[in-house]
Amino acid sequence: KTLNPFNTHTLPAQKPADHRPYGLKRQLVSRFAVVFLLAALIGALAALGGYRLIASETHRQSADNMARHIQRHLHEITLEWENGAIKLKTQVDFMRLLAGDDPKRWLKLQAYLTALEGSVKNYDSVLILRRDGSLAFASGAESEHFNSANASALNEAWHLGEDRDAFYRVSRQRLWLGDEGNGSMLFLRPLENATLTTLAPPNTELYLLVDGKVIASSIGSEGFSAQINPDFSGSLETNDESIEQRSILIGGNKSSSVHLVMRAGFPEPLGAR
């Protein structure tokens, strides 16, 4: 046996440390983090989609309610116009301007209407028809387009102007014409910008279209260049808001060429864009 002069012991070779458990743990943590982030992202997208769906449905219901409100308000306004026409006709009756056979009675009526300009200025035209439907008197901007042949046809609640650039509410009142018996007094009042401005709720715009062309708008002449499909009702998307368009029924209107269109804007929250 050979002695080691340095009295040292030979140690067995050591294996390198095994780091596999730590590596597996790190991989599991990384995968869990990825799965968590994906689940959070999917959840956020689902929540955003659900919010958009709820918001869209809310916008649709709000637009439907606005359209019904505008329709009711327009009916109330036309009733006010009707009452105004009744009062004017009653005044003419009371003054007995047409009760006799005075050849100057039409001149007297014109002078009386001119004196009442503050009351009649909102009526674009005033017509008087005899019992047989012939035209006896006409005053106002639209009056030049009427004669005995077409004036007697004003039996509807609304009338589209000769140049198709105005739409009138027609009020027909019975009027005593003296020896000629009962006739009719007709008042024509246009549905114009000011009326649409009164009708439009906040964040909405109203457009009156004839043959697809805007002839009146709640935002004035600025709206005349708007490109609108009057047959469409639904949602329109822009960069910063959702727009709901509705076609509103005008009570008594029988013209398929005339449409009243509402556009209501609903701003989108930043996170929903």
Image (tube, rainbow, N blue to C red):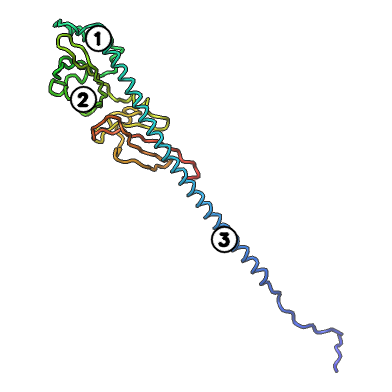
Residue at numbered disc 3: 35
Q: Residue at x 51, y 50 (%)?
A: 47
Above or below residue 160? Residue 100 is: above
Label 2, secondary structure: give it. loop
Of labels 2 and 3, earlier in sequence is 3
Above or below residue 42? Residue 183 is: above
User: What amino acid is at disc 1?
Assistant: Asp
Label 3 packing within 10 angstroms: few (<14), some (14-19), many (20+): few
Q: Can you tell which quarter of the image residue 96 is in?
A: top left
- Residue 125: give x, y in percent of width and height: 23, 18
Of labels 2 and 1, earlier in sequence is 1
Q: Can you tell which quarter of the image residue 186 is in?
A: top left
Residue at numbered disc 1: 93
Q: Nearer the viewer, mark 3 or mark 1?
A: 1
Above or below residue 19? Residue 167 is: above
Left or right: residue 70 versus residue 29 is: left
Q: Residue at x 25, y 6 (%)?
A: 95
Label 3, secondary structure: give it. helix
Q: Nearer the viewer, mark 2 or mark 3?
A: 2
User: What amino acid is at disc 3?
Assistant: Val
User: What amino acid is at disc 2?
Assistant: Asn
Residue at numbered disc 2: 155
Count of labels shown?
A: 3
Of labels 3 and 1, earlier in sequence is 3
- Residue 160: give x, y in percent of width and height: 22, 28
